[in-house]
Image (cartoon, rainbow, N blue to C red):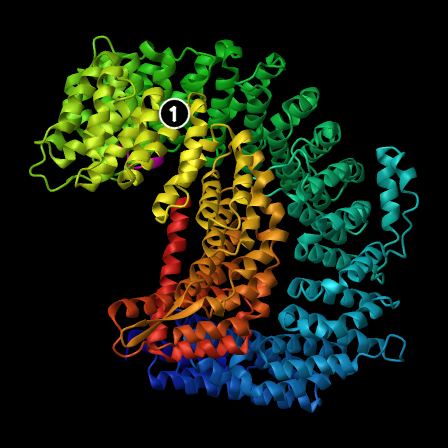
Amino acid sequence: MSTGSFYISSLLEKMTSSDKDFRETELWFMATSDLMSELQKDSIQLDEDSERKVVRTLLRLLEDRSGEVQNLAVKCLGPLVGKVKEYQVENIVDTLCASMRSDKEQLRDIAGIGLKTVLSELPPAATGSGLAINVCRKVTGQLTSAIAQQEDVAVQLEALDILSDMLSRLGAPLGAFHASLLHCLLPQLSSPRLAVRKRAVVALGHLAAACSTDLFVELADHLVDRLPGPRAPASPAAIRTLIQCLGSVGRQAGHRLGAHLGRLVPMVEEFCNLDDDELRESCLQAFEAFLRKCPKEMDPHVPNVTSLCLQHMKHDPNYDHDSDEEEQMETEDSEFSEQESGDEYSDDDDMSWKVRRAAAKCMAALISSRPDLLPDFHCTLAPALIRRFKEREENVKADIFGAYVILLRHTRPPKGWLEAVEEPTQTGRNLNMLRAQVPLVIKALQRQLKDRSVRTRQGCFGLFTELAGVLPGSLAEHMAVLVSGIVFSLTDYSSSSTIRMDALAFLQGLLGTEPAEAFHPHLPTLLPPVMACVADPFYKVAAEALLVLQELVRTLWPLDRPRLLDPEPYVGEMSTATLSRLRATDLDQEVKERAISCVGHLVGHLGDRLGDDLEPTLMLLLDRLRNEITRLPAVKALTLVAVSPLQLDLQPILAEALPILASFLRKNQRALRLATLAALDALAQSQGLGLPPPAVRTVLAELPALVSENDMHVAQLAVDFLTTVAQTQPTSLVEVSGPVLEELLQLLHSPLLPAGVLAATEGFLQALVGTRPPCVEYSELISLLTAPVYNQAGDGGPGLHKQVFHSLARCVAALSAACPQEAAGTASRLVCDARSPHSSTGVKVLAFLSLAEVGQVAGPGPQRELKTVLLEALGSPNEDVRAAAAYALGRVGAGNLPDFLPFLLAQIEAQPRRQYLLLHALREALGAAQPDNLKPYVEDVWALLFQRCESPEEGTRCVVAECIAKLVFVNPPFLLPRFRKQLAAVFPGQPYTRSTVITAVKFLISDQPHSIDPLLKSFIAEFMESLQDPDLNVRRATLTFFNSAVHNKPSLVRDLLDDILPLLYQETKIRRDLIREVEMGPFKHTVDDGLDVRKAAFECMYSLLESCLGQLDICEFLNHVEDGLKDHYDIRMLTFIMLARLATLCPAPVLQRVDRLIEPLRATCTAKVKAGSVKQELEKQDELKRSAMRAVAALLTIPEVRKSPSVADFSAQIRSNPELTTLFESIQKDTASGSSMDSMELS
């Protein structure tokens, strides 16, 4: 027997002792408590005999006379469930069910609590354990009989509670009992007891989510049939119960109610007009559930529901609001007294506030579920909500604020939104309507900002914060009202500190959204309470106040604009308050960090006004720099001071600060290293020669170790600092230039070198040769850079990665630009290397890539020779050499257009075999040349390119499209309209030309803002008409262009989606006329010519989910996703990803059709590969299964989805199949590791 089992046996002996003395000294109670502690240990293991004894003892203790012992025994049942065998759990359940029917009330109560405890501790069915299902099946029959007997109401209530809990956790596995449960619960809706009816309503809601379709229809029909007509005689209690049941079913299984809403909603609307507040509340709650779960099916009923919400939101028969205008003319004191007298109308029997609250919540659901009706909501709901801000009941007022905040959030312009100047978009019109509401909101909330209720003021701050985020700058003219409200809350010491923190957070947000000038007149009023909060003893208030003070300094006295406000009256007070916090050592860490940051901003922005306080402040920062806890914020504060354009004198701290910063570069804390490098660079730029050379050399000694590909960001900052030092103190670099160059050259050989590191390296190399005398000679640097390529053995092609050659060429060009006198000689050597028959492939590639950069600054001499060399290289047998030569020809030509461009155009005409390479060269020339220099050649190039649009090779046409796009950038207003004419001119012939033009439009779209965007937006609709082109390639090109627009600049197409989406969805359908059979010897192969177009259409749909979700009708969207789940392999892969995304973004519509969506997923996961399939076919099928299982895992994250019978059935199938179980577990592990990696990156 183990030690744990022996100890438990001794406890059981004490608990079974009949010695009266034992009981009197309460050792029995203590033994039970010790037993519970033992059972809660994971390590405890019971043998069979111990299990039996523990179970028997605890069940006997449930009948103990002492309530305390009974309670402890019940608590022991929870951990015991996981420690004993299944038959013992069933024994416990049987005993508890029998005790529930006992005559003793106390025993019945304890048995009910025990059953709930046991059921809550059972392992979920999803884990594969059958214990929960077996136990619940055993319990269900006994609970059903207890509910049906109706002899004892207490037993009924307890049984209904347990049944509700059981159905909510394990509804689907109890499928065999659903019919009997339904027939048992429905009669309880007519029970004379209100408590029974309420519990039956809850249980039916959970049952509705899990039962079969037939039973759900039976339940819905029962509710509809039992609901009398509004004018038919019926018991009000019965009607209320049925409506509440509808609401419960709607909340738990509303996605299944869609087909029945046509009958239900009109009846509920009629009942909503009866004079019964509790019934009205239930009707509005039912509408809220319908709107959230079935927004599409509720569409015909939205006007009526809106009207009912508006009517009942102001339903307040016990209060008269007619005197509002008079109240606003009273003084503040009388306002409070009137508000108090208004509160006297509130009566304990008054239920009207519940109706108003239900109406507000229903309105919030309406706005959330129908963002497409936003313009109507701004006209109808918004004014009504604003008028109801005067609501006297606090709970209702919070929901009204919440509904208006939801309206604001849906009005917020999408990311990247562009307002059209000529024709305002719907988003612009919504914002204009909201702008007109701002004065009304201010007027309605002016008094609320000084309300006695903290919750009301918090609601006001939250609403104003959202409003300022949607319409930045809209609150500036009302700043007096807002400042008055903020000061009221900041000085309200009678309430909790939470309201002061909320007021400070609101003020900080305002400083970020409103213009600084709006705060100037109010600063004398605003600053004293903020200073008082800085000194507040509660650390959270102080930390928030320091953040506000920092934002005040940054906003009111910016460094990039002239000062419009004299800081002299305020700087002393701000400095004193902040320094007192900085000097204190017994502060919370958050306050310390905020105080240091605030001092950094104060010195950086107003250091010239600190006078004699500047040096002590800097010494304090230095002191905080030495402290391990505060060193990181101190480094960041020092950076702020160093980058300040005020040119502050930092000499008092430099000699001590630099060695400390140098030591930070050796620390493992990455954030500290990054901040330190940024601080060092800022100090080097601002102080220059003022930095003490010995201290600089101490810092430089740490840098070679940081120039490594282990951390590219650290390497970039280190190289930037080295560049600054080379420009300000070149003599300090002598000792470290060698080791640094060695590491830097290793870094250049990395194929993953980021553009930022490469640019920093170029700047450093230029700084090395730019000093007088140079730190390193030009020729030495060139040799170091090119040596790895020139020293390669053999000619097996480039031994280094292709990207390395581009990096080295950029560095050679940077050196040539820094030493123009050396450029011609360098170009001549490169030309010789390129021409030499003894040069390896790597040398030739590097020579041509370097010439591409150097040739533009080398002068006309080498350029004349270059033409011949580059043309010869275009015929090289090596593909890398040919590509490098074409790149060089274009880049060099961009620097000498009059000489090269006519020559290049002539070569394209004369050499059709080299046309592809020559077009690549033309693309580089058009991209690198200045637009003004290209204008004389536009017509010639335009004509040549459009002659090549009908090329049979798709690769050539793609390069032509890129060239056309780069040419359009030369003169967009003139050339872009010619696209439209070109499309019309070649229709219906020349489909290749039409697809090339559309592809060229795609290349006009970039992910960065560009001057062509407004012009392009005006033509997008005409280009999208090509979706109706009869040619497949043209439609595919149009879809690719549309996908690029949606992905990179959704604002270009967002307002056109109503017209585009029907055409897009049309392309997702399988067209039988495009499927043909091809005979391949004895075999027949099916070819689908429409597959590429369908694939492009589904790719567009996926992109729309990312950037235009608000403009999509998700139900219609899901129809086409559903079709894609049964399509070709490539399309199924896409739709599986889309379905997983939709499960996260729009769970309600997915839940509505989950029964239909799960079947294709099940078919894919259980599909068998044909015998004799090749390896590629097996791999494709495995990847398809993994993708389908990811979609299943995503669906299972929707809370209510496991209650669906089809999902529960498939889940059981996964658990019973070892192969599917392994696959599902691996998917879950991948998901868990991905989310943990995301959290690590965020931290």
Left or right of 745: which side holds 990?
right
Question: Split into 4 quadrants, where in the image is the N terminus?
Answer: bottom left
- Residue in front for this viewpoint, 19 or 474: 474
Helix, strand, or loop for circle 1? Answer: loop
Question: Split into 4 quadrants, where in the image is the C terminus?
Answer: top left
Residue at the spot of label 1 = 929
Query: In this rendering, is residue 589 above or below 167?
Result: above
Q: Which residues are magenta?
A: 666-671
Residue 1071, visible in the rendered structure? yes
Q: Please report the residue visible at 24 percent of the width from the left and 14 percent of the height from the top.
A: 819
Quadrant in the rendering for residue 239: bottom right
Quadrant in the rendering for residue 724: top left
- Residue in front for this viewpoint, 1026 or 467: 1026
Q: Please report the residue visible at 67 percent of the width from the left and 41 percent of the height from the top.
A: 425
Residue 646, position as x, y percentages in the image: 47, 12
Residue 1152, position as x, y percentages in the image: 60, 69
Query: In this rendering, is residue 703 above or below 1222?
Result: above
The mark tally for this picture is 1
- Residue in front for this viewpoint, 708 or 557: 708
Q: Please report the residue visible at 34 percent of the width from the left and 25 percent of the height from the top.
A: 902
